[in-house]
Image: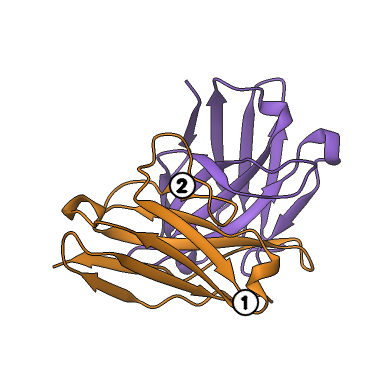
Chain colours: A purple, B orange
Amino acid sequence: EVQLVESGGGLVQPGRSPRLSCTTSGFTFGDYTLNWVRQAPGEGLEWVGFIRSLAYGGTTKYAASVKGRFTISRDDSKSIAYLQLNSLKTEDTAMYYCTRDTGLLGRPDAFDVWGQGTFLTVS
Amino acid sequence: SYVLTQPPSVSVAPGQAARIACGGNSIETKSVHWYQQKPGQAPVLVVYDDSDRPSGIPERFSGSNSGSTATLTISRVEAGDEADYYCQVWDGSSDHVVFGGGTKLTVL
């Protein structure tokens, strides 16, 4: 069974730098682009960023709202993706989801598997 | 940056068809994906690449994409279809992923 499990959320103070983890199983992690998506309470889905597979350079892209503050990385040997959050603001309070991207040839596509999310409160 | 526009809400009676629009500039040139999110749950992919359904998704869910509007159609709506629905694309010019603002489907 394909699974993505996020962890690392909780209550943090503004300006702190926690790291979220996305631990995966049931598929060949290294073949896939991984995305992070967040959802503030009562709000819609917001794409945070993605990291391509190493076959496509492991390149990363970020939403303008987090660029320069958040960093996505991956450890293919452990099948884990990370979201490093720096310079946190209260408006970063949200549920953070890790998702598997079905895209081929490094081109992002649909997100076919989602984790259950980890909630981060910045206060 | 690329923008996707969805109506905030759609209401439909049980057994009728619900149509949820997703507007974007030349959206027909992009692959549109749709997600269903019920309260307290993670989103679920219900339509990908404009009109394909993942395994396990009922045939009642279908999609289309033409001109400046993509549409998710749910035929013979059931109470269990009540949820928020989001469209999503990849914008190749910016290499960014974009979500629509979401539509709350209410089954009357």
Helix, strand or loop at label 1? It is loop
Q: Which quadrant of the figure contains the C terminus of chain A?
A: bottom left
Helix or strand or loop: what does disc 2 sit on? strand
- Count of numbered marks: 2
Q: Where residue A112 sits in the image (x, y, percent)? A: 53, 41
According to the image, label 1 marks what residue? B67
Q: Earlier in the sequence, mark 1 or mark 2?
A: 2
Q: Is residue A114 above or below residue B80?
A: above
Chain containing mark 2: B
Chain letter for the residue marked with disc 1 in the picture? B
Q: Nearer the viewer, residue B2 or A74?
A: B2
Q: Residue at x 75, y 49 (%)?
A: A107
Left or right of residue B54, residue A101 in this image: right
Q: Is residue A40 above or below residue B27?
A: above
Query: Which residue is outermost to the left?
Result: B108
Depth check: give the residue in front, A68 or B5: B5
Mark 2 residue type:
Leu
Q: Quadrant of residue B95?
A: bottom right
- Please, what is the three-letter code of the amino acid marked with disc 1? Gly
Horizontal and vertical percent for residue B69?
Answer: 54, 75
**Residue B80, position as x, y percentages in the image:** 20, 50
Name the residue beneath numbered marker 2. B45
Q: Classify B64 as above or below A12.
A: below
Q: Badge 1: few (under 14), some or many (20 or more) residues near its Cα, within 10 Å?
A: few
User: Depth-wise, is mark 1 or mark 2 nearer the camera?
Assistant: 1
Q: Which mark is residue B47?
A: none
Is residue A4 something one can see in this rendering?
A: yes
